[in-house]
Image (cartoon, rainbow, N blue to C red):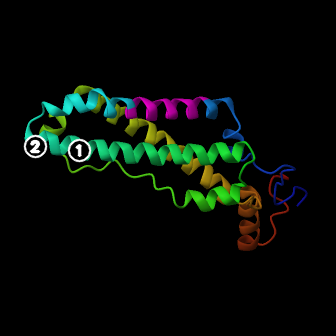
Amino acid sequence: MSEPDVITLSQDPVRFGRNFVRSEAFRALFQEGMELVEETAAYLDGQGREDSRGLPRGAVVAYASESMRLTTRLMQVASWLLLQRAVAEGEMSPGQAQAERNRVRLPSGDTTTSVDDFEALPARLRELIGFAARFQARIIHLEQLITDGEAAKPRACDANPVAVQHSLLARAFGGLDRVGAD
């Protein structure tokens, strides 16, 4: 056979995570995340306290539960963002960040609050919960892209599928040197 059985590339694959954390897109994402954290903290410490005073009893429990869940979610997201920025700025190696990342849990959006209690919450709190949930989903997606990209080692390319089939046919029917010669 005159063609190589395996195609080899002269370069390693591009590592998304290493490039992304040094990009302008990451800086914008970082800024967006930190602004959401600040905005949420300002609301919960200010207007949110006022809003919670007028809620019915069931909604007060839901308010406390959802605001705690929201705060936890945003602190975990902020921790993830800070780790990525530390890698981008050379303050941590990717290996150190991976060890720290294992401590950062990006919680799921599960809630035990009923729909009625959730809808009784102040509109601004519901809005912040929605923003945080969507932002967290983006972070989880990026984390998967980054860790999958780092975990994937460059592998040797699989054999040329046409060559494999040709080889199988040759073994099955004994030498196919004449195929295509007619």
Q: Quadrant of residue 81?
A: top right
Question: In this rendering, is residue 72 above or below 175?
Answer: above
Q: Report whether residue 157 is seen.
A: yes
Within 10 Å of disc 1 (Cα), the crowding (few <14, some 14-19, many 20+) is few
Q: Please report the bounds of the magenta region as a residue range.
A: 28-41
Where residue 31 appears, x then y in whole percent? 56, 30
Residue type for callout 2: Gly
- 152 left or right, relative to 136: right
Q: Inspect the magenta stretch and tell me whether residue 26 lies in it.
A: no
**Answer yes or no: do the residues labelled 1 and 2 have beta carbons within 8 Å?**
no
Question: In this rendering, is residue 44 above or below 5?
Answer: above
Where residue 64 appears, x then y in whole percent? 23, 44
Q: Quadrant of residue 53?
A: top left
- 32 and 175: which is toward the camera: 32
Q: Residue at x 50, y 34 (%)?
A: 33
- 10 left or right, relative to 125: right
* Magenta region, main secondary structure: helix
The residue indicated by pointer 2 is: 58
Q: Report whether residue 114 is seen.
A: no
Question: In this rendering, is residue 126 above or below 113?
Answer: above
Where residue 127 appears, x then y in whole percent? 31, 29
Q: Residue at x 10, y 43 (%)?
A: 58
Question: In this rendering, is residue 56 above or below 124?
Answer: below
> Callout 2: helix, strand or loop?
helix
The residue indicated by pointer 1 is: 64
Mark positioned earlier in the residue sequence (1 or 2): 2
Q: Residue at x 19, y 46 (%)?
A: 113
How many marks are shown on the rendered structure?
2
Residue type for callout 1: Ala
